Amino acid sequence: MAGRIGLQSVHPVISHGELPARAVVGEHVTVEATVFREGHDAVAASVAWRNPKGKLVSDSRLRPLGNGSDRWRGDVVATSVGMWSFTIEAWSDPLATWYHAIEVKVDAGQSAPELANDLETGARLMEQLAANCPNKAMGKLPLAAARDLRRDEVDIPLRITRALSRELRQLAYDYPIRELVTRSDSYQVWVDRVRALYGAWYEFFPRSIGAILAGDPADPARPVRHGTLADATKHLDYVADLGFDVVYLPPIHPIGEVNRKGSNNSLDPKPTDTGSPWAIGSAEGGHDAIDPKLGTEQDFAVFMARARELDLEVSLDFALQAAPDHPWVTEHPKWFTTLPDGTIAYAENPPKKYQDIYPLNFDNDPDGLYAEVLRVITLWIKRGVRIFRVDNPHTKPLNFWQWLIATVKKKYPDVLFLAEAFTRPAMMHELARIGFTQSYTYFTWRNSAEELRQYGEELVAAADYMRPNFFPNTPDILNEYLVTGGRAAFAIRVVLASMMSPSYGVYSGYELFENVPVRPGSEEYLNSEKYQLRPRDFRGAIERGDSLAPFIKRLNEIRRAHPALHQLRTLRFHGSDNDAILAFSKRDPDTGDTILVIVSTDPHNVREGWIHLRLDELGIDWFTDFTATDLLSGSNYEWSEHNFVRLTPDQPAHIIAVRRQV
């Protein structure tokens, strides 16, 4: 049913208001609505913003966007984690109507007798305004204006001067007279901690850290040296030194023996093959256990403690699947799918086959399976894990995830979930809507400047519920761009990932330029770490000048120093004459900090051309020069709306701090 004042198209509203929008503490959330009414009287609107306890925190005016759109906009900011809510209020604004009418009529030369009703109406409105003021002192001005409006012996210009003053108009804006108030429904916004939006992730396999591949030539079956959690604990210093915020570990549980895969996903494993960490479970335990080869619960506790000392968070892989010898298979056979021949179905993603993994069936015994999953994740939360990278969530029911995430957050609101869902857009977006904190994206396959611009704009449009995490590579994905692009490709992609998205990550080996596929055209790594140990000489590579680590460290330093790069909603793209040069900017709404990035997407050739900046998006007045400080080279440039750039494979990007000239 229509309200007295037209109030439509409220934003942000997710799934018709059935699900909350998303934000993080301190993030500016844009609120909008279409507001209008019959006739010519003025309307106005505001947003009432309430904290998780239902207390009104602010009631701020929305501003009209103009251009005949009837669209009104404002911002709200949350200060704590939890479920916030907002309501839009629209109303008739009699003072604004009066201001317009009296100015037009006076300009038209109407006489005092003709304006008698207008002047008395204004006086009464001034008295109402005085009553709205929070104290008598503030109300003195509108009361004085009311007296002036009733002074018949004074000329019209003097009678209206006080009423039309800037100070009084500001009072009218701050303490408006609201008539015919119409309210929207109340809409929810779930507010997470800042790490939900911003952070640099680094993925490594603990079993490869400190590993030794050379076994005893006289005894090929003798196990190689397997990395441990103790080794991984020492490696945290390297990760922290590069400026990462989150350490992501693949599954650390016991690995199945039955149908174990060998190197490069082969079906004929050797006795020394370690198997895939995602083939979870054996006689040594399941999802609640730690692989004995890695260490003990105490070793994990030491690992977590060291991470906290280094200001690192730990993300643990949460993979809901089982190896054939997982305890669940014998104890809860209903949790799996039995084929007509009596065997249990293993995982497939045609043409890929995963004979070492049994998918879970969530429909046969949902009560039992749901309870077990909640028990497992609660156990790891109690062990200190507050971030879970969820493996293949798109292969499990949506209602299960909605239930699990809501149940966990009710008790542990600081827990975050990253969806590893490289799948159809509809599924990715729905996973975000129902509760996933972050999502992997199609960034890995968006390589041209135009593809990146379009995709960036899509993500900004979905920022009210979906937060991206850009990974240039994963243990599963080696994009052809990295295979053929050489070292410049690695630099370009990590610049794009770290600057475009507030959350990004790399899988270890990226800094060492690993780019050999198992076969031409494949996205699988040769000697994939998913199936074998892969020790690396990280520090030696830095000493030899054969590592991208120092460059990544500098990017992370820039990210930490500039709050503009903690934002997603303010990502904006600028023009370029060269189709292989991408220009984009971000701006922090609180500090005004502004970063402009110009990057070549061509790792093979020199690219040059003119870029055309939207100065208003940089906080710069049109036709004004500004100082552009390149945070990579340290050079300063005097730039304006149009600027010539030249990018090479050795220096493929400018990261510009925009500084207005004084």
Image (cartoon, rainbow, N blue to C red):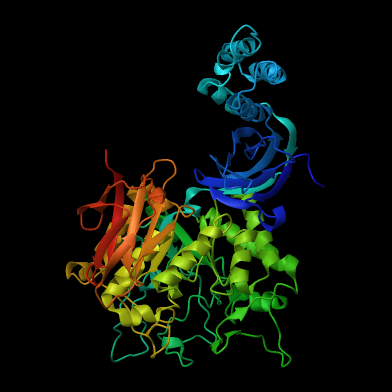
Tell me if residue 149 can be seen. yes
In the shown orientation, is residue 147 left or right of residue 184? left
Residue 206's x, y, as percent? Answer: 39, 69
In this orientation, does residue 509 appear? no
Report which quarter residue 259 is drawn in. bottom right
Q: In this view, does 324 lie to the left or right of 447?
A: right
**Is residue 521 found left or right of 650 in the rendered image?**
right
Residue 334 place in picture, x, y as percent: 73, 77
**Residue at the top extreme?**
153
Q: In which quarter of the image is residue 346?
A: bottom right
Judge by depth and name the residue closer to the eye, 494 or 331.
494
Q: Which residue lies furthest to the right in this view?
A: 1
Q: Point out the image quarter for the C terminus.
A: top left
Front residue (pair 445, 405): 445
- 427 lies above or below 659: below
Tell me the residue at 44%/64% (across/down): 248
Rendering coords of residue 143 (x, y %): 62, 12
> Is residue 236 left or right of 385 when viewed as pictured?
left
Along the line of sight, the residue nearer the viewer: 311 or 583: 583
Quadrant hosting residue 44 = top right
Image x and y of residue 613, in percent: 36, 56
Total numbered labels placed on residues in the image: 0
